[in-house]
Amino acid sequence: MWLKYIASTKKEALLLLRDKAGLAMLFIMPMALVFIMSLLQDSTLKKLEEQNTPVIVINQDTGSFGKSIVEGLETAGFFIVSQQINGKTPSEEDLRQLVNEGKYRVGIIIRPGATEALRQKIKYRIKQQFPEEERKLLDLGAISDTTLPHVDVYFDPVTKSNFKHAVISALRQFSAGVVAEMVFDTYADLLNELVDIQLKQAGGFDEMIDFTQQYATPEKKNLIIPNSTQHNVPAWTIFAMFFIVIPLAGNIIHERESGLSMRLKTIPGSNLAVIMGKTTVYFIVGILQAGFMLLIGMYILPLFGMPMLRIGSGLFAFMIITVSVSLAASGYGILIGTIATTQEQSSIFGSISVVILAAIGGIWVPTFMMSGLMITVSRLSPLNWGLNGYYDIFLRSAGISDILHYVLLLLSFFLGCIFLSYLYNRYKKMKS
């Protein structure tokens, strides 16, 4: 069996090396795919990060409320605020039209008298807190239960609901400072009237809590910030490794059609040795593909202004998951080649099945953007197991113990494919 394995491995290697064009495609196309997809997605991410949301504002209020809203939008760092178009204040109809055409993502109209309406509302509610007999002693001026100050917010029709909620939350935050200041002034006036104590305004009430943003990695020295490179290099590496199903399955069918497989069966020993010989050669191809992809992420992509791929401290874990993915891809190729009866069947089914597994596995669209059902379905894809393993290593500085369940899943998938191929070969042999 050992000699049969060696002969099969040598034969597969020679066939692969003689096909210079096919060998080049196995390496050049995946590397080009990684480069192009990383470049495209990096540009998209930079646009989302660097280009703030354009907002047009009509401030019809002359008090502190309208001023606070405008200043909050301008200083937030997320919006590009415009109050004039071609040197003129736009009308409400112009604002709605500009937003509807997509020239501005958000349009805001702050209605006249908003500040005074807010002040009256606060005074009225504070007065209602006192017993009836004490209310007559308070001199808050002429107050009434007015309607709340009104702000109209218009959104571009293509705007998603989560962005709308974010904008409304930001507007509520900007107005909260004005409300707090008015409440303080009102209570200060009441206290001065009742006990003749004049309070001093010690400052605003915003930023009273310190929020610290951090990534939840256990050690700061291993902190790796997610970026387009960290996603695309492992994602398209796995995709390329699984795409060897096409040449591998095609090679098996070619041997069958040419009669070579029958001559190999005449050699003493189990047919499993032939299967493992093929697995070894294409396993090495997968490892080399991953190595080239890694070098591209570390040294080539940064030359074009993209982030450098950082493995972190889990180099050995990276090697383990790469070996597992390569074995799983080789096993899947052998299974397709064993079951398919023609070159057309293997190439069509193999390529489509890999694309489907990639799509549901998070290669094309990250799983966090999927619905709950699709997230559950994605866990069935071996490409998802490999991608999650790389994510844990690159982004969470995971060790072998942290990715062991993904490794076991991939190895189980590989052994299952090899076992099914072996059983199918035995079934065909007994049937013939």
Image (tube, rainbow, N blue to C red):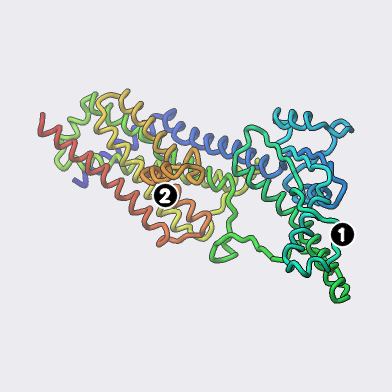
Q: In which quarter of the image is the C terminus?
A: top left
Query: What residue is rendered at 78% in x and 38% in y?
Result: 56
Q: Which amino acid does label 1 sit on?
A: Gly
Q: Residue 141 carries which label?
A: 1
Above or below for 202 versus 335: below
How many numbered badges does the structure rendering display?
2
Q: Could you classify mark 1 by the number of other residues whose Cα lies within 10 Å: few (under 14), some (14-19), or many (20 or more)?
A: few
Q: Could you classify mark 2 by the number of other residues whose Cα lies within 10 Å: few (under 14), some (14-19), or many (20 or more)?
A: many
Image coords of residue 222 (percent x, y): 56, 62
Camera-nearest label, 1 or 2: 1
Q: Can residue 424 be seen in this view?
A: yes
Residue closest to the eye, 425 or 53: 53
Q: Is residue 18 rendered to the left or right of residue 175?
A: left
Query: What residue is rendered at 18% in x and 31% in y?
Result: 263
Image coords of residue 412 (percent x, y): 29, 49
Q: Which mark is residue 242?
A: none
Quadrant of residue 330 within the rendered picture: top left
As helix, strand or loop, the secondary structure at mark 2 comes to helix
Query: What residue is rendered at 18% in x and 45% in y?
Result: 1
As helix, strand or loop, the secondary structure at mark 1 comes to loop
Disc 2 target residue: 322
Disc 1/disc 2 C-alpha distance (Å): 76 Å
